[in-house]
Amino acid sequence: MTMPAVRIPGYVAGTWDIDPVHPHIGFMAQHLMVSKVRRHFEKFQAQIVTAEDPLRSWANAAVEVNSVTAGNQTRDDHLRSDPNQRVDRRHAAAGSPDSGLFLG
């Protein structure tokens, strides 16, 4: 049995690129269970595709992994030099509904 398409008044199907000036893509981690460590990515792209049937809409996003920053040069240098991070080898991370998250 096929579900009928959902109808939303004023809904517009289309493709939109995320304006890189306004959004913030970041994360927070607990450091030694004492303090919160926050980082964000300075370079990224994202796109939202709204389908005629809203239930078939999707989004795609990619970040440049080596653009991660803490806003503190000493911490940034440490993060990028950590052999466990290897951000020099992982230039981009991207995800979509079909592919999941992958590192390039």
Image: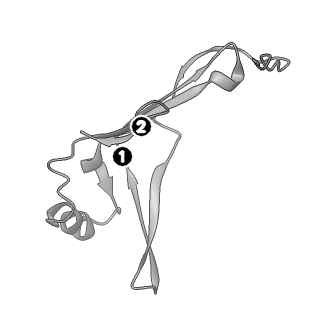
Which residue is depicted at the point 57% across and 27% down? 58
> Which is more N-terminal, label 2 or label 1?
1
Question: Which quadrant is home to the N terminus?
Answer: top right
Q: Which residue is mark 1?
A: 42
Question: Is the residue 81 above or below the residue 87 in the image?
Answer: below
Determine the secondary structure under disc 1: loop
Which residue bears the numbered disc 2? Answer: 95
Which amino acid type corresponds to the residue marked 1 in the rendered image?
Answer: Glu
Left/right placement of residue 9 relative to residue 48 reads right
Q: How is the image coloured?
A: one colour
**Along the viewing direction, whichever of 76 and 13 lies nearer the viewer:** 13
Q: Is residue 73 above or below residue 44?
A: below
Disc 2 is placed on an element classified as strand
Q: Give the crowd class for mark 2: few <14, some 14-19, many >=20 residues within 10 Å.
A: some
Q: Position of residue 68 (x, y in %)?
A: 31, 54
The answer to whether any part of residue 62 appears in the image is: yes
Q: Amino acid at mark 2?
A: Gly
Please name whichever residue, 44 or 62, is drawn nearer the observer in this view of the structure. Answer: 62
Residue at the far front: name it: 1
x and y percent of residue 90 in the render? 21, 46
